[in-house]
Image (cartoon, coloured by chain):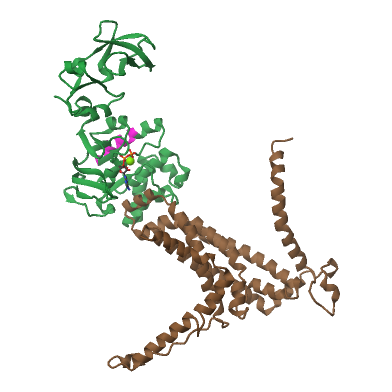
Chain colours: A green, B brown
């Protein structure tokens, strides 16, 4: 079990309120991802759940038990840090054994769990090395191993992959997702990487300045963002925002349309402009289109290779039914 | 010209200077330790000039080994050095860990803690032996007299008088005596050098990784376990540095021993060298070579021990 609830939880450092009171529930077995720009309070929220920070007000509940005053180690949660936080003087084996040693488990049981964790994480060959002799990916695996052996109610990850190179990141992302599918333990995962959020999450929590902007499944956030912030934050490349006459036509203050929802046509599209930068990736082509009279730049994504280059005139046809409309407050109009 | 030669050439002045710096005194000591060389001798005036014709082989070494003070001096050197190292490292770690936490007035406390290190050794010794440890006029004498006065006045009190009449009179300890003078030296040097240890450990504690601590907290490690498994291993290297530097310094303690008891009962090797050097340079040099050997043994032994116990 591992149902985590935050009730009116707030956090201030001195006079600065980093997290205004917020409510959030993460169901047992869920993979929840916190995303948001740097400094929005993702790590702080995670540390509040872990108990590494005291709440200024409000309650943290795990499986309906109030743990607000319970010490971090008694909450039954495991955390994986961005910097791995391995114990540098201990071998991999001792690192993984540490939480069990603190809990006073028998040597046999420790050994059994170490071997199981090492096998599932491909660490068997490195058990007698020190963390300094491992690569970044291996270190991250050790940190995960140390988290697994405690058999926690929930795993907390604070940007665990951000120190890895792109290829390793993809591999580890898949491993963690598989681990979740296998263990079905609650996981809370902090990232500012869109792709990680979209691919791994059951539930994404979008934060801005400590405020939850929207909670929902990746596709909900993609197809029905509640406000301009979420609309701009989720999706890559970013959604195009258009104000003025074009927006008024749709009875909105702002309309948003994703780059993949604008089609490039031979001629006679609703919008025309000149191509600025054209990024030919082979599978896709991204155009940054200027002089449309709608916005400074429109980003357009076309499938496959489209033979238009810098300075060419481009004709665009937006899919009107994929447009998102927002009112004066930046909120979504249904 | 090969690639290596130019850098080597440019390094050489420094290397040569250092070699000369080290080798000449060591060479001279070795040379003197194998010849008869005294400052005054009416009977054998030829011994007052160092010369190869006065070759004595290992005679000086035998002479030193047979001296009744030699073994005592080695024992005493080891006793003093090891006690000081033990105390300064333990006190240093404790104090450094204590003042590593933020508290009001931490800056001032730190400066005050470091200040004993800036007192000159001779002044430090005079202060301690006369003003603190003196059995009559020092703090110790005053404190013991005060306690005795208090007890004797309480012996006449009504109800509880019988209890205090069972108490003995306390005797102040004389730290200039044969048995205790080494203790006095250990106390004053520990007081002076603990700040050095604190300073080194404090800087090291500041570079301790806080996320490791948090991970350990989540892993269920209490304050002691965190100290034992994270802080102490982290401090292993600084402890080794403190031990090395102090071992070198304290094997050559002189001023304190001179001031406390004039070497009465607690000569160490340098003091013995000093005594020999009043006349017999040959014996003094031989003792010096013994001191070098001892210093090396001590350093190797201590470093091994620290490496084993702290690094797991
Ligand atoms: N111990 C602290 N004292 C004061 N302010 C803090 C402290 N820890 C965090 N903050 C502030 O709280 C805010 C949120 O910080 P937090 O680390 O949670 O951000 P984040 O969303 O994790 O950012 P990033 O993506 O860069 O890791 C920041 O403005 C930060 O300056
Ligand atoms: Mg963070």
Residue A325 coordinates in the image, percent (x, y):
18, 22
Q: Is residue A176 magenta?
A: yes
Magenta-highlighted stretch: main secondary structure? helix
Quadrant of the rendering where the N terminus of chain B is positioned: top right
In the displayed orientation, state which residue is furthest to the top: A267
Residue A293 coordinates in the image, percent (x, y):
27, 14
In this view, B268 is above or below A193: below
Instruction: Judge from the rendering whether residue A132 lies leftward or rightward of residue A214; answer left or right.
Output: right
In this view, A53 is above or below A216: below
Identify which residue, A108 or A158, lies in the foreground.
Answer: A158
Instruction: Judge from the rendering whether residue A84 lies leftward or rightward of residue A24; answer left or right.
Output: right
Identify which residue, B190 or A186, lies in the foreground.
Answer: B190
In this view, A124 is above or below B229: above
Identify which residue, A53 or B292, lies in the foreground.
Answer: A53
Name which quarter of the figure residue A21 lies in: top left
Residue A326 coordinates in the image, percent (x, y):
18, 24
From which residue to which does the magenta span run? A173-185
Q: Is residue A36 magenta?
A: no
Residue B59 coordinates in the image, percent (x, y):
77, 72
User: Where's ligand 1: which quadrant?
Assistant: top left
Q: Residue at x 26, y 27 (%)?
A: A232
All told, the count of numbered labels is: 0
Residue A73 can be seen in this image: yes
Instruction: Judge from the rendering whether residue A155 lies leftward or rightward of residue B176; answer left or right.
Output: left
Identify which residue, B211 or B218, lies in the foreground.
Answer: B211
Residue B310 can be seen in this image: no
């Amino acid at each position: 079990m591992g149902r985590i609830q935050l009730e009116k939880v707030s956090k201030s450092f001195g006079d600065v309120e980093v997290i205004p009171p917020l409510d959030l529930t993460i169901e047992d077995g869920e993979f929840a991802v916190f995303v948001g720009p740097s400094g929005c309070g993702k790590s702080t929220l995670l540390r509040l759940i872990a108990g590494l920070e005291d709440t200024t007000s409000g309650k943290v509940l795990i499986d309906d038990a109030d743990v607000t005053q319970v010490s971090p180690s008694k909450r039954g949660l495991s955390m994986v840090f961005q910097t791995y936080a391995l114990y540098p003087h201990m071998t991999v084996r001792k690192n993984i054994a540490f939480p069990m040693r603190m809990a006073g488990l028998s040597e046999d049981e420790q050994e059994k769990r170490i071997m199981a964790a090492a096998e599932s994480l491909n660490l068997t060959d490195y058990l007698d090395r020190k963390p300094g002799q491992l690569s970044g990916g291996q270190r991250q695996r050790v940190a995960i191993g140390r988290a697994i052996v405690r058999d926690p109610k929930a795993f907390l990850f604070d940007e665990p992959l951000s120190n890895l190179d792109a290829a390793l990141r993809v591999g580890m992302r898949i491993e963690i997702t598989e681990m979740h599918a296998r263990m079905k333990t609650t996981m809370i995962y902090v990232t500012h990487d869109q792709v990680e959020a979209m691919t791994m999450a059951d539930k994404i929590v979008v934060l801005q300045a400590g405020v939850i902007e929207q909670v929902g499944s990746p596709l909900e956030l993609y197809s029905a963002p509640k406000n301009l912030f979420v609309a701009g934050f989720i999706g890559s490349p970013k959604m195009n925002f258009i104000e003025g006459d074009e927006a008024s036509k749709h009875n909105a203050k702002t309309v948003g349309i994703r780059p993949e929802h604008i089609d490039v046509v031979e001629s006679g599209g609703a919008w025309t402009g000149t191509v600025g930068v054209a990024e030919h990736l082979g599978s896709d082509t991204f155009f940054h289109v200027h002089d449309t009279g709608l916005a400074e730049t429109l980003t357009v994504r076309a499938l496959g290779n489209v033979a238009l280059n810098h300075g060419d005139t481009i004709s665009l046809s937006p899919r009107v039914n994929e447009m998102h409309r927002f009112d004066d407050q930046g909120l979504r109009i249904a | 010209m090969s690639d290596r030669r130019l850098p080597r050439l440019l390094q050489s002045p420094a290397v040569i200077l250092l070699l000369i710096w080290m080798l000449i005194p060591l060479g001279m000591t070795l040379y003197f330790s194998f010849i008869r060389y005294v400052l005054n001798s009416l009977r054998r005036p030829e011994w007052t000039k160092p010369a190869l014709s006065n070759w004595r082989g290992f005679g000086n070494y035998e002479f030193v080994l047979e001296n009744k003070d030699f073994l005592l001096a080695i024992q005493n050197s080891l006793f003093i050095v090891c006690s000081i190292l033990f105390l300064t490292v333990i006190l240093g770690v404790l104090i450094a860990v204590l003042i590593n936490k933020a508290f009001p007035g931490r800056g001032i406390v730190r400066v005050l803690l470091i200040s004993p290190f800036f007192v000159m050794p001779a002044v430090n010794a005079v202060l301690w032996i006369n003003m603190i440890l003196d059995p009559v006029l020092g703090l110790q004498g005053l404190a013991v007299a005060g306690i005795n006065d208090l007890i004797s006045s309480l012996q006449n009190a009504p109800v509880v008088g019988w209890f205090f009449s069972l108490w003995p009179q306390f005797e102040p300890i004389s730290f200039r005596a044969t048995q205790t003078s080494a203790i006095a030296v250990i106390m004053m040097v520990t007081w002076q050098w603990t700040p050095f240890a604190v300073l080194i450990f404090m800087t090291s504690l500041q570079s301790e990784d806080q996320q490791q601590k948090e991970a350990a907290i989540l892993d269920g490690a209490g304050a002691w376990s965190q100290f034992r498994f994270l802080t102490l291993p982290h401090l292993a290297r600084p402890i080794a540095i403190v031990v090395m530097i102090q071992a070198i310094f304290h094997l050559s303690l002189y001023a304190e021993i001179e001031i406390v008891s004039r070497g009465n009962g607690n000569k160490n090797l340098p003091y013995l060298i000093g005594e020999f050097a009043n006349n017999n340079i040959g014996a003094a040099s031989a003792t010096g070579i013994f001191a070098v050997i001892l210093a090396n043994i001590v350093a190797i032994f201590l470093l091994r021990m620290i490496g084993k116990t702290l690094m797991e």
